[in-house]
Image (cartoon, rainbow, N blue to C red):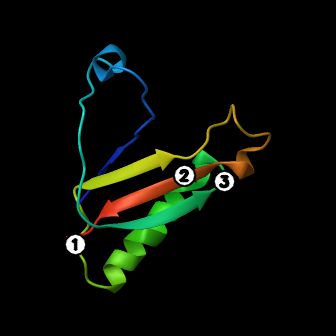
């Protein structure tokens, strides 16, 4: 099963003014497993692979929803090694 990652970003003001065409607003709730990826976005698939291994080891079905929350961005740091991304896999 493939999952579809979401990429949330902080919003101030009226959401209707910043909602991008083709995207939708969602409110998420419930429990999730969290992993923290530190480093370049180019290596984030390795972190996802580790999470998939965890799910497999514990015989858990992969969720339909994965959220990547970017704590900072390349404009905030001097090196891509300083990037931090929180990854949430919904717990079933």
Q: Which residue is mark 1?
A: 61
In the picture of the structure, the residue carrying the numbered disc 2 is: 85
Residue at horizontal 43%, vertical 26%?
A: 12
Please report whichever mark, 3 or 1, sits nearer to the chain's N-terminal start. 3
Q: CA distance from mark 1 to mark 2?
A: 23 Å
Spot occupied by residue 3 in the image (x, y as percentages of width and height) = 29, 53
Of 77 and 66, nearer the camera is 77
List the residue tagged with mark 3.
Answer: 39
The number of discs equals 3
Location of residue 40 with respect to 48 vertically, above or below: above
Q: CA distance from mark 3 to mark 1?
A: 27 Å
Q: Nearest the camera: 12 or 23? A: 12
Label 1 residue SS: loop
Judge whether 86 appears above or below 25 on screen.
below
| Among numbered discs 1 and 2, the one appearing first in the sequence | 1
- Please report whichever mark, 2 or 3, sits nearer to the chain's N-terminal start: 3
Question: How would you rate the neighbour count of disc 1 (Cα within 10 Å): few for under 14, some for 14-19, many for 20 or more?
Answer: few
Which residue reaches farthest front? 13
Residue at 31%, 85% in the rendered image: 58
**Helix, strand, or loop for circle 2?**
strand
Q: Can you say whether 64 is above or below 31 in the image?
A: above
- Tell me how far mark 2 sits from mark 3, CA to CA: 8 Å
Q: Nearer the viewer, residue 41 or 91?
A: 91
Front position among marks 2 and 3: 2
- Within 10 Å of disc 2 (Cα), the crowding (few <14, some 14-19, many 20+) is many
User: In the image, residue 41 lies at what x, y percent?
Assistant: 59, 46
SS assignment at label 3 = loop
Spot the residue most to the top: 17
x 19%, y 70%: residue? 92
Circle 3 packing at 10 Å, graded few (<14), some (14-19), many (20+), is some
Q: Residue at x 43, y 49 (%)?
A: 68
Q: Residue furthest right?
A: 78
């Amino acid at each position: 099963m493939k999952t579809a990652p979401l990429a949330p970003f902080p919003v101030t003001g009226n959401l209707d003014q910043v909602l991008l065409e083709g995207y939708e607003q969602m409110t998420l709730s419930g429990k999730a497993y969290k992993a923290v990826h530190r480093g370049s976005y180019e290596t984030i698939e390795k972190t996802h692979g580790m999470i998939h291994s965890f799910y497999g080891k514990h015989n858990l079905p992969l969720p339909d929803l994965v959220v990547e929350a970017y704590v900072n961005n390349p404009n905030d740091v001097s090196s891509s090694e300083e990037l931090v991304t929180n990854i949430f896999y919904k717990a079933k």
